[in-house]
Image: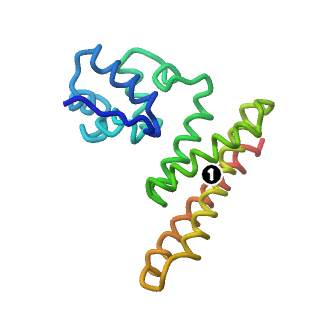
Amino acid sequence: MAATIRKDAPYKAFAERLTALRTNAGMTRAELGDKVGVAGRSIINYENGERIPYGDVCAKMAEVFGITTDELLGIENSALAMAREEAIDRMRDINGKSGAERLQQVYADAANLAGGDLSDEQLLEFSLEMSKMAMLAQQRLRERHSGKKYQSTVTEKAEQTKIAVKAIDDAIIAMNTP
């Protein structure tokens, strides 16, 4: 069964690269999953362009295919790209698919504003700050527009958002501490 990549899939380029690498290596999704330590269903999600692997799985995939993680991801700045993708995945986990799509639009708009004049470290910090802002904005929308019937879900999501924001703040502090 071939993976179907939607035109608007969040990770379409990665999905196409991974599918080509796997098929050229003559592996099934299950075989690749076994080699990198994830379920075959995860490989399907990667090849559908719906998800991107976290760093450890990405490193294992690159090793399996004999390429660098940068080559696997198709990027020039892997730390920045991984931070961006992990922020989108966190947004998806907290707010669902539409929240992640909104965050991707924020990144696209922000990239136009940044104009490429920032260092890699500044871009990484910017990425983390944008992720935090998007999470907080989504939480405010949820609080404002959810009825009493869903208040327990709103409260639960607020706690998840609080934890994620704290983790981002800690990462930013760590980046700026010599």
In the image, residue 65 sits, relative to residue 38, either above or below, namely: above
In the image, residue 31 sits, relative to residue 86, either above or below, namely: above
The residue depicted at 32 percent of the width and 31 percent of the height is 36
Measuring from the top left, give residue 163's x and y in whole percent.
Answer: 56, 63
Residue 107 position by quadrant: top right
Measuring from the top left, give residue 100's x and y in whole percent.
Answer: 51, 51
Residue 124 position by quadrant: top right
**View extreme (front): residue:** 7
Measuring from the top left, give residue 22's x and y in whole percent.
Answer: 30, 21
Horizontal side of residue 131 vs 73, given as left or right: right
Q: Quadrant of the N terminus?
A: top left
Residue 40 position by quadrant: top left
The residue depicted at 39 percent of the width and 25 percent of the height is 16
The residue depicted at 68 percent of the width and 43 percent of the height is 109
The residue depicted at 63 percent of the width and 63 percent of the height is 137
Horizontal side of residue 158 vs 136, given as left or right: left
In the image, 65 versus 158, the foreground residue is 158
In the image, 83 versus 47, the foreground residue is 47
Query: Label 1 sits on what residue type?
Result: Ser
**View extreme (right): residue:** 117
Q: Secondary structure at mark 1?
A: helix
Horizontal side of residue 39 vs 110, given as left or right: left
Badge 1: residue crowd in 10 Å (few <14, some 14–19, many ≥20): many
In the image, residue 124 sits, relative to residue 87, either above or below, namely: above
Residue designated by label 1: 131
Q: Quadrant of the C terminus?
A: top right
Horizontal side of residue 115 vs 78, given as left or right: right
**View extreme (left): residue:** 1
